[in-house]
Image (cartoon, rainbow, N blue to C red):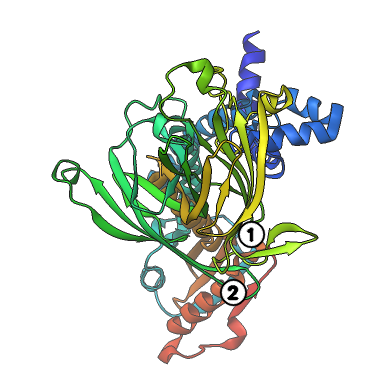
Amino acid sequence: MTALLRNTWRGLTSMRTALVLLFLLALAALPGALLPQRSLNSGKVDQFIADNGWWGELLDRLGFFAVYSSVWFSAVYLLLFVSLVGCLTPRTFEYAKSLRARPVLTPRNLTRLPHHAEGETARTPVDVITAAGNRLKGWRLEVREEDGGARSISAERGFLRETGNLVFHFAMLGLIVALAIGKMFNYEGQVVVLANGSEFCNSGTFAYDSFTPGLRVDGTDLDEFCVKVDDFTAHYLPSGQADYFRADIGYQAGADLTSGTWRPYPLEVNSPLRIEGDRVYLLGNGYAPVFSVTFPGGEKRTNTTQWRTVDGLTHLAQGATKFDPPGISDPAERRKKQLAITGLFAPTAVLHDGALTSAYPDLNDPAVAVDVLRGDLGNESGRGQSIYEVDQSMVDSGRLKSVARANLRPGQELKLDDGTVIRFDGVQSWVYLQVSHDPAQVWVLGFAIVLVLGLGTSLVVKRRRLWVRATPATGENADGRTVVVLGGLARTDQAGYGEEFQRFAAGLLAELAPDGGDEDPAKQDVAAGRET
């Protein structure tokens, strides 16, 4: 059993396993990019399942619509973390040990190395090694004395390659940890705010239309700030494509919340407001028709409700604006006279086969096609209800009935059978804001930059070794001469070390020759073989 656990641990903490897990993590993230996710749009998920039958239900059971919170994705993520820690720990100790180690001994036969050179000189072995050392500035050097009066120098360079490799993997480990911390403590919320001076405060989840908290966020300790949307400006190309968006906002944070000071900021699509560690983005915009209802008793109510954009090119919108009748305390009687103004809003109205539609997203000729419903809106049923539509079950049961239909332009009115007058007063813009909080964002960016730098260093820096041996010549014609043998070794063929070695060898041998020239070309040989 102990052997099994030991072998399992060794396999898990190998670099090969870490690479396989990294590939599996990237592969596991693909469904999150290709398939709709419940955390982003549950409606699209339900529609996908309905369109694909058993296949969609199978994907749902396997967690493909909640990839990043699924058990299998978390398992791969955790295994990768453990593998990296187990892999990097011994490598770090080995690297620290190699930094303190002396360069390896000079090989006995340097001419058998892939890169080698030979020559003779009248200088002593000490002078030769001194000249070689002067040319090896920046290399790790070790000078050794050998038998027979010979001297050698061992040189190593390129330890930054392993440094970059370790930095790359530690940065990857830090990136994984930072992403996990961000997932635990981040939150993201979306809210629609009318561009008429309406305010939004980041005081709790209740202030948002939708809110996605991190695993350790309960919404009770959000960063306090407020945003007021004073105006919205949009410019469109003749084709209807959006060219420019800007929301003129004011914001309060810190001491401004008590002093009441609003600080202006032009919020644009690619220019978020950064405040109190949060970021406020402008995601979209739309229109909110303004209706006034004068009831038979003379009471007047005005309501402005955002309508949902159903055509992104022309900004045709659909929605429902709801009214409770005033002065009626009896709930049963009140439920009989509630009003809902439903229909379509067109910023540039045109009629197509008698139906209202829009030809352009800007407010060139606004109009609404309304269907007025009267009866029980279902507001007191205890069920949640969308602000963009009425409860269809109330219509199907006959408790909510259509009483009038008309196309209206700003200033026009519609009178109901009981004397109620509905007036289309105009239209206001709304903006769709997103508040994002991620305390690990800066760390993720930092680790990503370090990761790239470490990878670049490991790819650019080449690990290589070089040896020089100076041996007193022997034989009848020695005349006090010294035989110089050089050898070089690189880790890879692509290191470009052959040219570097030849330049060093040729320069050193030329320096050792009398007058800096070739002493005897017949006695000098520079060879660069191909490393295998």
Q: Quadrant of the C terminus?
A: bottom right
Q: Nearer the viewer, residue 410 or 512?
A: 410
Query: Could you tell me which residue is drawn at 41 percent across and 62 percent down?
Result: 139
Q: Can you give x and y, in whole percent of width and height, for residue 68 in the image?
A: 60, 33
Disc 2 or disc 1, which is closer to the eye? 2
Q: Between disc 2 and disc 1, whose residue precedes?
A: 2
Q: Can you give x and y, in whole percent of width and height, for residue 71 in the image?
A: 63, 23
Res. 454 in view: no
Q: Can you give x and y, in whole percent of width and height, for residue 65 in the image?
A: 68, 32
Q: Which residue is disc 2 drawn over?
A: 237
Dots 2 and 1: beta carbons under 8 Å? Answer: no
Q: Which residue is disc 1 drawn over?
A: 492
State the image quarter where residue 64 is shown: top right
Mark 2 falls on what kind of element? loop
Q: Nearer the viewer, residue 117 or 362?
A: 362
State the image quarter where residue 297 is shown: top left
Q: Residues within 10 Å of mark 1 (few under 14, many from 20)?
A: some
Mark 1 falls on what kind of element? loop
Residue type highlighted by circle 1: Thr
Q: Is residue 288 above or below residue 90?
A: below
Q: Nearer the viewer, residue 513 or 451?
A: 451
